Image: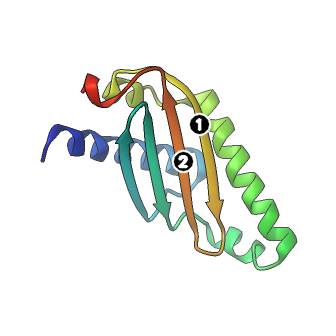
Amino acid sequence: MDILRKKEAELANVIRHFRKQYVGKGPERIKVTIFGNMILVYTEGNLTPVEKFISKKETGKQAVVEARSEMVKELYRKHFPGEIEEIVRAQFIDLFIDINIQRDTSMTVFIFDRMLVSGL
């Protein structure tokens, strides 16, 4: 396994653990890609049984989207796992999150202060 794939696997483990610890459930599947100054994280199987039930109605769906997106952003901003910065040897700047309730998938983009691939 080349160094880039090894780093992506390490990041997937840290992110899965973080989400399980702070959200109560980690994703069933996770794919991490390092690209430029970003870490792209695609996940499947994020929702808890309660969130799936609530999201059956449109108002519930919107509440789950807002709670998942905003809550996870806030958690990362307050409790950003230092292991991520150690793995990529760069400083975290910001993140963007979107979730698709019907497909139970999400995309998170972490932005760092420099190109990541060159520093690995």
Task: Name the amino acid type tagged 2.
Answer: Thr
Counting from the top left corner in percent of width and height, residue 59 is at: 87, 69
> Left or right of 58: which side holds 19?
left
Q: In the rendered view, tell whether residue 59 sits above or below residue 116.
A: below
Q: What's the colour scheme? A: rainbow
Pointer 1 or 2: first along the chain: 1
Question: Regarding mark 2 in the picture, which secondary structure is present there?
Answer: strand
Question: Regarding mark 1 in the picture, which secondary structure is present there?
Answer: strand
- Residue beneath label 2, please? 108
Q: Residue furthest right?
A: 59
Counting from the top left corner in percent of width and height, residue 68 is at: 68, 53
Instruction: Please say if the residues under marks 1 and 2 sit with CB atoms less than 8 Å apart.
Output: yes
Of residues 31 and 53, which is closer to you in this image?
Answer: 31
Q: In the rendered view, tell whether residue 105 sits above or below residue 113.
A: below
Counting from the top left corner in percent of width and height, residue 32 is at: 38, 49
Q: Quadrant of residue 50?
A: bottom right
Quadrant (top left, top right, bottom left, bottom right) of the C terminus? top left
Q: In the rendered view, tell whether residue 101 sits above or below residue 96.
A: below
Q: Residues within 10 Å of mark 2 (few under 14, many from 20)?
A: many
> Left or right of 52: which side holds 38?
left
Task: Name the amino acid type tagged 1.
Answer: Leu
Q: Alpha carbon of mark 1 to alpha carbon of mark 2: how far?
A: 7 Å
Q: Quadrant of residue 55?
A: bottom right
Instruction: Residue at 76% x, 79% y: name it.
Output: 56
Q: Residues within 10 Å of mark 1 (few under 14, many from 20)?
A: some
Q: Residue furthest left?
A: 1
Of residues 12 and 51, which is closer to you in this image?
Answer: 12
Q: Which mark is residue 95?
A: 1
Counting from the top left corner in percent of width and height, residue 52 is at: 68, 74
Q: Quadrant of residue 84?
A: top left
> Left or right of 110: which side holds 100?
right
